[in-house]
Image (tube, grey):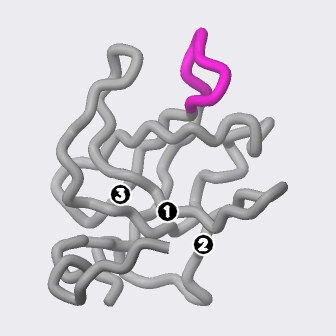
Amino acid sequence: MTEITFDEFKKAEIKIGTILSAEKVPDADKLIKLMINLGEENPRQILSGIAMHYEDPSVLVGKQVPVLANLPTRTIRGLESQGMVLYAVGEEILTTVTPDREIPNGTPLQ
């Protein structure tokens, strides 16, 4: 495991957002396009390589998830991705990490 300093960790802006829509990206085996409300004026489009774990992406709609919000926008398969959803990942598992109660979109994690 690579250690980072506390100051490096503080640079990460992780916020809670609600998934508004989720759909597979055509002609991409792994990608799901998520629209996420982070409490900003417009929802963010985030591409996530999780399609093999979610046969029906619509099960993600309505979930609140942590988002690394201050990554630079990245273009993947011609689509912009404006952040990264954080998941719990193990050898045979990938799952969303959700708060135990609904909280306002944009709430920062510390």
Most common secondary structure along the magenta stretch:
loop
Q: Residue at x 38, y 63 (%)?
A: 67
Q: Is residue 26 magenta?
A: yes
Looking at the rendered image, the disc whose residue lies closer to the viewer, 2 or 3, is: 2
Q: Which residue is mark 2?
A: 97
x%, y% of residue 42? Answer: 22, 48
x%, y% of residue 62? Answer: 58, 60
Residue 37: image tag: 3
Q: Residue furthest top?
A: 27
Q: Is residue 5 magenta?
A: no
In which image quadrant can residue 79 be found? top left
Question: Disc 2 to disc 3, how far (Cα)?
Answer: 16 Å
Q: Residue at x 46, y 56 (%)?
A: 85
Tell me if 56 is positioned left or right of 29 in this view: right
What span is in magenta? 24-31
Q: Nearer the viewer, residue 90 or 52?
A: 90
Q: Circle 3 — which element? A: strand
Residue type at mark 3 is Asn
x%, y% of residue 7? Answer: 15, 85
* 1 and 2 marks in contact (CB < 8 Å): yes
Q: Residue at x 35, y 40 (%)?
A: 45
* 2 and 3 marks in contact (CB < 8 Å): no
Tell me if 104 is positioned left or right of 29 in this view: left
